[in-house]
Amino acid sequence: MPHEKHNKVIYERLQEKLQRRKEKGIYRKLQLHQGLADFCSNDYLGLARNKELYSRTKNELGQISSVLNGSTGSRLLTGNHAYNEALEARLANLFDAEAALIFNSGYVANTAIMSCVAERTDTIIYDELVHASIKEGYRLSFAKRYPFLHNDLTDLEKKLKKADGEKFVVVESIYSMDGDRANLNALAELCQDYNANLIVDEAHSTGIFGKGGSGLVCELGIQDSFFARVYTFGKAIGSHGACVVGNHVLIDYLVNFAQGLIYTTALPLHTLVSISNAFDYITENEHLQKDIKQIVRHFQKVMQPSKFDIKLNDSPIQIVRIGDARKAKDLAERLQRNGFDVRAIVSPTVKLGEERLRICLHTFNTESEITQLASYLQG
């Protein structure tokens, strides 16, 4: 039948594309690695597994009489709750902004703001290593867009000079696949010189840097230099969701035009309560930020010298460059067999030839674990 023939054709096409990935050594599949030492997750401060924090969230939920299993609708319909607005006010204060707006994830927040703010006559200029969610967002806009070389302000300035309309510059404070910092102070000065609107994704600095986990921009004290900042809660905060902060005009605009907010069911109350309690916990336990920095220093110490091309950072994300997908996967599998959950990062997540191990450090990793991991890596 024609319908069956059509199905056969499309499935053959999909299978061919999957087979090509297998041949290149970049085929993805879901994995379970239970019982391994975690050097893979984004739970940098251990809050996703923190039993005290779990109990606090559970207890607070028990005191709220209007708790539902789900939020029942989008924020503009039945999904708004007084807790949403109280938490947004708190987040605006924490991140030293006029207003905040909660989204369901960092991916949604980035895609939403990039897709609806810039217009056809505008220009988006982005660091070539920004997250896929940012790239997804600018593809949905009608604006012109150009990448600039990673952390290369000279190349950025060249692009700014030829940009039309409103100019938007988009960076991450800590880059997710490289672990290095953007030069935020210099970026802020350059964008001011060219009257460009600076947007930063603070996904991997939220919780790690800044008073109360307020991120790298607040730690540097340059929050007024940014048009918009995105903070996510699924990494060091140990929960889920994200927020965009900026002035009231921006937040009101997003409520009216950001499809990622308008057309999706809101986060459930449980998630909002867990976010709030996580920031309480970070504020009460200032040692967490010191602890993760100490863990990072220990890793750097035991990994030097190394037979690998290692990119050491002051963030919890450390990079071991391999340059070959199969070799990176083989090394990750050897580490897993020895009890360490380390994953290979391959194309298309990173460029061909830049395959690597991405080692994530956490407050719950012991120095002996890290020393042993380094020994297996070097062996």
Image (cartoon, rainbow, N blue to C red):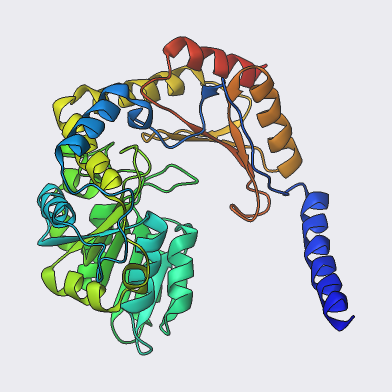
Say which of 54 and 230 sits in front.
Answer: 54
Position in image of residue 249 (x %, y %): 14, 74
Say which of 133 and 160 sits in front.
Answer: 133
Residue drawn at point x = 13 percent, y = 47 percent? 94
Residue drawn at point x = 26 percent, y = 62 percent? 79
The C terminus is located in which quarter? top right
Residue 154 in sight:
yes
Q: Is residue 85 above or below residue 357?
A: below
Q: Is residue 341 above or below residue 182?
A: above
User: In the rendered view, does 283 fall on the left or right side of 300?
Assistant: left
Position in image of residue 22 (x %, y %): 80, 50
Residue drawn at point x = 68 percent, y = 37 percent? 328
The N terminus is located in which quarter? bottom right
Furthest toward the top, the residue is 368
Position in image of residue 333 (x %, y %): 69, 29
Can you tell which quarter of the image residue 246 is in?
Answer: bottom left
Residue drawn at point x = 64 percent, y = 44 percent? 355
Furthest toward the bottom, the residue is 121
Position in image of residue 155 (x %, y %): 42, 67
User: In the rendered view, does 342 fall on the left or right side of 299?
Assistant: right
Say which of 97 and 147 sits in front.
Answer: 97
Q: Is residue 360 above or below residue 74?
A: above
How many numbered marks are there? 0
Say which of 332 and 7 sits in front.
Answer: 7
